[in-house]
């Protein structure tokens, strides 16, 4: 097989032969693959829309509970901040899915940011639980949870800094 004939049967994501069959595969395989890729895009957009709806519901629920909750202002503030952080987690996942649906690569930074936000949200909930008097063993366990979460958040922030630093070095080269 000559090089030109091989290139004509090899799909490329940006050339005119993007829909051509792979060597050793027939046209039905190429159609099935295109159908599956199309179905993947439809499902990604459905999930993205669902995340928007869930995010709006979380934000509305958080605002309503902050206004209607019969608790101290600090408890309402912490509940509101947790709701906003949950909303941010949902939106980061939404952005990741939308980027992938539009043909972009899934980037590590989005997942690191999601992890940091999730850990901060969990740290806040542990702090709220620590303000409620409990038995000493439970408080000790909560302090350990807090320390582990803080350490994990630190590691993720360092990983985010390294990822951004190496991306800048790659772009500069």
Image (spheres, rainbow, N blue to C red):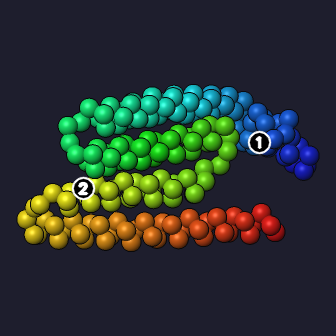
41 vs 35, nearest the viewer: 41
Determine if residue 112 is in view.
yes
> Given the current orientation, which residue lies at the most extreme left position?
135
Q: Is residue 64 left or right of residue 100?
A: left
Where 64 falls versus 73 (above or below)?
A: above
Q: Position of residue 34 (x, y in %)?
A: 66, 31
The image's mark for residue 23 is: none
Question: What residue would you read off at disc 1?
Answer: 13
Residue at 45% in and 46% down: 89
Graded by Cα atoms within 10 Å as few (under 14), some (14 to 19) or many (20 or more), the crowding at tag 1 reads few
Q: Position of residue 158 (x, y in %)?
A: 53, 71
Which residue sits at x=63%, y=42%?
Answer: 99
Q: CA distance from mark 2 to mark 1?
A: 51 Å
- Tell me if residue 168 comes above or below residue 105 in the rendering: below
| Quarter of the C terminus within the rendering | bottom right
Label total for image: 2
Q: Give residue 41's quadrant in the image.
A: top right
Element under disc 1:
loop
Q: Residues within 10 Å of mark 2 (few under 14, many from 20)?
A: some
Point out the tag, 2 or 1, that comes first from the N-terminus. Answer: 1
What residue is shown with label 2?
128
Q: For residue 93, say whether it is visible.
A: no
Is residue 34 shown above or below 7? Answer: above
Give how far across and how far down residue 7 sits, in percent.
86, 45
Residue 24: image quadrant is top right
> Residue 33: x, y in percent?
64, 34
């Amino acid at each position: 097989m000559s090089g030109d004939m091989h290139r004509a049967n090899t799909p490329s994501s940006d050339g005119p032969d993007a829909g051509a069959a792979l060597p050793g595969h027939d046209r039905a395989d190429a159609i099935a693959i295109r159908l599956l890729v199309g179905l993947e895009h439809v499902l990604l957009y459905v999930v993205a829309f669902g995340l928007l709806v869930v995010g709006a519901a979380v934000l509305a629920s958080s605002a309503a509970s902050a206004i209607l909750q019969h608790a101290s202002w600090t408890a309402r503030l912490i509940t509101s901040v947790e709701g906003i952080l949950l909303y941010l987690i949902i939106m980061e996942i939404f952005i990741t899915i939308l980027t992938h649906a539009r043909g972009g690569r899934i980037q590590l930074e989005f997942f690191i940011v999601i992890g940091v936000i999730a850990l901060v949200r969990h740290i806040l909930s542990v702090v709220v639980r620590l303000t409620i008097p409990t038995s000493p063993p439970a408080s000790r366990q909560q302090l350990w949870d807090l320390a582990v979460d803080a350490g994990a958040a630190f590691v993720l922030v360092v990983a985010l800094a390294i990822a951004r630093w190496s991306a800048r070095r790659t772009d500069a080269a």
